[in-house]
Amino acid sequence: MEYRGYDSYGFCVFNGDKSPFLHKKTGKISDVESELSNLDVPGCAGLAHTRWATTGGVTEENAHPHFDCRKEIFVVHNGIIENYRELKEQLSQEGHKFSSETDTEVIAHLVEKFLENKNEDGQKRSLEEAVAEALKLVKGTYGILVMSKSEPQKIVAARLSSPLLIGVNDDEYIIASDPVAIAPYAKKIVNLDDYEIAVITPDKLSLARERSAEDLEYTSQEVERGDYDHFMLKEIMEEPEAVENAIRGRLMPEVGSVKFGGLENSAEKLRSLDRLLLIGCGTAHYAAMVGEYMLEEYAGIKCETDVGSEFRYRKPIVDDKTGAIFISQSGETADTLACLRELKQKGVTSIGITNAIGSTQSRETSTGIYTRSGPEIAVASTKAFIGQVATMAMLTVYLGRQREMSLVTGSRIVSELDRVPELGRQILAKREEIKKLVEKYKGYRDFWYIGRKYNAPIALEGALKLKEISYLHAEGVPGGELKHGSLALVDKDFPTIAICPSDSVYEKMVSNIHEVKARGGLVIAIATQGNEDIKNIVDDVIYIPKTLEMLTPLLAAIPLHLFAYYMAIALGRDVDRPRNLAKSVTVE
Ligand code: G6P
């Protein structure tokens, strides 16, 4: 479960009726890869887990697998058992002894209890029956795998709102919480359904709902680093490709429009919408914000954007003309999914913008678009963000053309979008310049990011990326907001990155830059190629090629991603696996 090292890890291997081999440690699994591969552990079935601590600190005891009183039942779990305190108290009163602070451990003890107690017919329960009974008592979310010493060749798998899939080979099964983990080992997969319990033995996979395995979309090459030092750099270098993949076969410049296979059956419903809610978390939320500017200006639709974790506790005021767009790379983000479920229940038309094929979000939205960015492995999202913004641009044309957008405008946008990959490559070709700039600025500890209109969300994205992977203090703020408080922090030690392409708010950005310069602040500008004047105002300039204003985020994000990457390298950070963060946050 989980495919990457976070703060601790553990595994157990079953070998006949011997006590299973159990190994748990804190730290990163990547640091001990060679040590672990030299271990001689016989057996043909086992469980492994990398943990990102939620309930209980980062300790060896809290690492998975967790076990029952007799160390015979082992469990790995993603998700959160919300009522674990009550269950733990009750089990403790019944005599169960706990050895960790985690919520997960209650599952092992519940299974133990139901294996000991006979069922209503006086029969001993099988492991899967005991798991089913245990899960009836559990509130929360889970992807779990359970094994028992009494049936050492059986793995019981179950999920509820936490991804779990089974890779199917001729002679083995591999179960994981992410397709990326399975890609190098299997070509066929089965996605488990919520509430489904699967039983895996050496010769059989028993599912609650019989179905055949599907092809796994990812190739092993896509999930390897190749010649790059880090996945993040590989993924930034793939940003132009992310646009190419998103637009492939979808642009129709001659009719100034866009076609999406996934929306074909919902065209009439989408035409009737007059308001859109755009929801995502983290970087996906910034893509939603860019989308809001695009949709308002070019499709003439009222939009509202929010982060999933806030929106889920608001009181949404919706009617039958309200639609909701959910943006998520993984399609598994718990907060985004909670909003989807809440709004679906209110009858809102849901549109999913997702990268992960077969993900929970893509299965639960009424209609959707895949961003096709390919697997994104680094925790910080880069190419997936570009894919999301490119998709928002296309969706804007699609919805705009259903409304008042002219053929000429639609055609201009799609033709320019088609050029964006080439323009992006021009920026990437000059990445050494950004690396040099980082050398100059790597001694600073605080950074402002400012931008306006389409690039206000890009300022937030640039700051988030720097925080995530370099652990420096960075704040993004719309340029015009600076003077309403933030400016108080500006001095010679607090540089500002100003995104100021030659667009409708350029002059306004220049005023904001002057405000910073007048307080002794250093400024790095992201400006349009050919703008020589800007050099007289700022300290350093990174040029991006000229494009349509609404598409500038697709270019402006590239140098900001590179800046964050090179800064993290210069500071010796773990770029692909920044501390405290997880790629996909499947818990609230
Ligand atoms: C986590 C990741 C971010 C990502 C966010 C939303 O916080 O670290 O990089 O932007 O989740 O993820 P999603 O899969 O929903 O796009």
Image: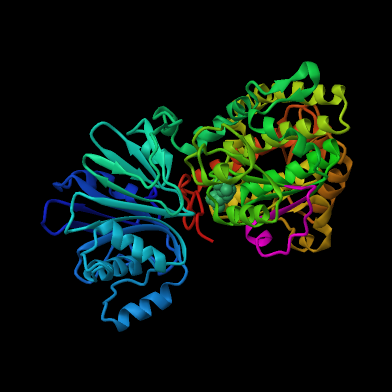
Residue 321 lies in the magenta-colored region: yes
Residue 122 lies in the magenta-colored region: no
| In-image side of 268 versus 196 (left or right) | right
Describe the colour scheme in one phrase. Answer: rainbow
Residue projecting furthest to the bottom: 93
Residue projecting furthest to the top: 254
| In-image side of 250 versus 537 (left or right) | left
The residue under the point 29% across, 56% down is 128
Foreground of the two, 25 or 459: 25
Residue 158: x %, y % from top left: 38, 53
Please tell me how many numbered marks the rendered image carries: 0
Q: Is residue 523 visible?
A: no
The residue under the point 76% across, 18% down is 253
What is the span of residues highlighted in magenta in the rendered image? Answer: 304-323
**Looking at the picture, does residue 508 appear above or below residue 411?**
below
Residue 53: x %, y % from top left: 42, 62
The residue under the point 34% across, 47% down is 30
Q: Is residue 231 visible?
A: yes
Image quadrant containing the C terminus: bottom right
Foreground of the two, 142 or 585: 142
Residue projecting furthest to the front: 121
Foreground of the two, 171 or 305: 171
Occupied quadrant, residue 362? top right
| In-image side of 420 versus 137 (left or right) | right
Occupied quadrant, residue 68? bottom left
